[in-house]
Image (spheres, rainbow, N blue to C red):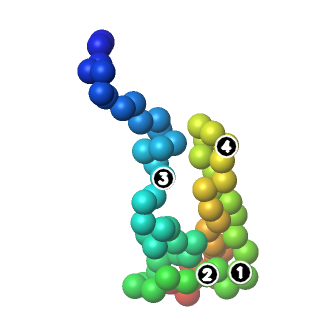
Amino acid sequence: MSLAANTKIITQTEHAKLTDASLFRSQAYVDGTWIDSASRATFKVTDPGTRETLGHVPDMDASDVQSA
C-alpha cells in the first residue's frame, strides 16, 4: 500500500481524543438525568491499548440500580 506524500497518518490515540471536552461525562445517565452513584464511589476507565486513564465513572451498586 502506498500513500500520497501529503497524507497524514492518524494514530488511534489521536483519533480517540475528544475535541469538545463538554462531551466527556463522569456521571451515569439515568432516567434523563446525569447522576453520581449514591455512595459517590467511582472507578477509572483505562484505554487497554495505552493503559492511559481516560477518566472516572460512577461505581453503581444494587441500590443505584433499584432507584433507576
Kind of residue indicated by mark 3:
Lys
Instruction: Of the two numbered discs 4 and 3 on the same chain, state the one appearing first in sequence.
Output: 3
Please state which of the two labelled residues, at mark 1 or mark 4, is closer to the viewer: 4
Residue that label 1 marks: 40
| Callout 1: SS | loop
Disc 3 from disc 1: Cα separation: 26 Å
Kind of residue indicated by mark 4:
Arg
Kind of residue indicated by mark 1:
Arg
Residue that label 4 marks: 51
Residue that label 2 marks: 36
Please state which of the two labelled residues, at mark 4 or mark 2, is closer to the viewer: 4
Disc 3 from disc 2: Cα separation: 24 Å
Residue at (52, 71) in percent of width and height: 25
Disc 4 from disc 2: Cα separation: 24 Å
Residue that label 3 marks: 17
Q: Is residue 58 left or right of residue 3?
A: right
Contact (Cβ within 8 Å) of mark 4 with mark 2: no
